[in-house]
Image (cartoon, rainbow, N blue to C red):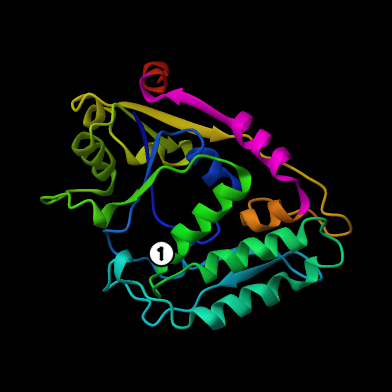
Amino acid sequence: MRLGIMQPYFFPNLAHFALIASVDRWIVFDVTQYTPKSWMNRNRVLHPVTGWNYISVGLKRSSTSITTKQAVVDSLNKSHQTVLGKLSHYRSTAPFYKEVIGLVNDTFNSLISDSLVELNVSTLKHTCQYLDISFDYEVCSQLNLEFDNVPDAGQWAPIICQKLGANEYLNPIGGAELFSLDDFTSRGVELYFAEVVPFTYSTKHYEYQQHLSILDVLMWNSPLKIRNAICTSCNLTKASELHAKN
């Protein structure tokens, strides 16, 4: 079983979904300290005039004194309407505007609490449903796993893999220096790194911007085109092979 473990991001970029499509099981990592002003409560879309613009979710308390699972949205309705407003300029040019607005509405309307984690899981779930990508997920804090003192950030993944019986773990290559290969091999886990090939597309009269929220990608491309890009863009390399080269 190949495992992916990531913090719950708000409508993350396409690379996040390429990782989801490349694993058997996805763990929403919500048990550590919350990071204010991160991708967990905001992301980026095209600005109406030039460049990019933030879409964000206001929190009742945004502080490092809470864990991610304790983060609560200040007003779901206000956040919902704010996001819709920040997307309204796509209406006149983006071919899939109505479908994306429907996805955003479904994401917010399906919530039964004001938990930020629930909201962000909903963004992943509804986007994967729209793209017809399998999303077998669990929330870490709901697994009743017992953790003793975890000495550093790089050891969470191998420990969780061992506890859940995973024999492979996939992480973005940008985080390669976070991990020690021995932490995985000693637990019988093969560590892989993923490098996602950039997916470029036409944004009509807007200047194309890299690494925007999946919402921007969805506005301009059909689900089939995006799914094909996701399924062919994730290049995997064994950490052991990288280690041998070095």
Above or below, 38 relative to 186: below
The part of the chain drawn in magenta is 220-240
Residue 45 visible from this viewpoint: no
Residue type highlighted by circle 1: Glu
Quarter holding the C terminus is top left
Q: Residue at x 68, y 51 (%)?
A: 210
137 left or right of 184 in image: right
Q: Magenta: predominant secondary structure element?
A: helix
Residue 187 or residue 85, whichever sits in front:
85
Give residue 101's quadrant in the image. bottom right
Residue 73 or residue 238, whichever sits in front:
73
192 left or right of 94 in image: left
Q: Position of residue 223 (x, y in %)?
A: 69, 44
Q: Position of residue 236 (x, y in %)?
A: 49, 26
Q: Residue furthest right?
A: 205
| Residue 224 in magenta stretch | yes
Above or below, 225 relative to 58: above
Q: Position of residue 187 (x, y in %)?
A: 19, 28
Give residue 216's quadrant in the image. bottom right
Q: Residue at x 61, y 37 (%)?
A: 230
Q: Position of residue 143 (x, y in %)?
A: 23, 51
Residue position marked by numbered label 1 in the rendering: 118
Q: Secondary structure at mark 1?
A: helix
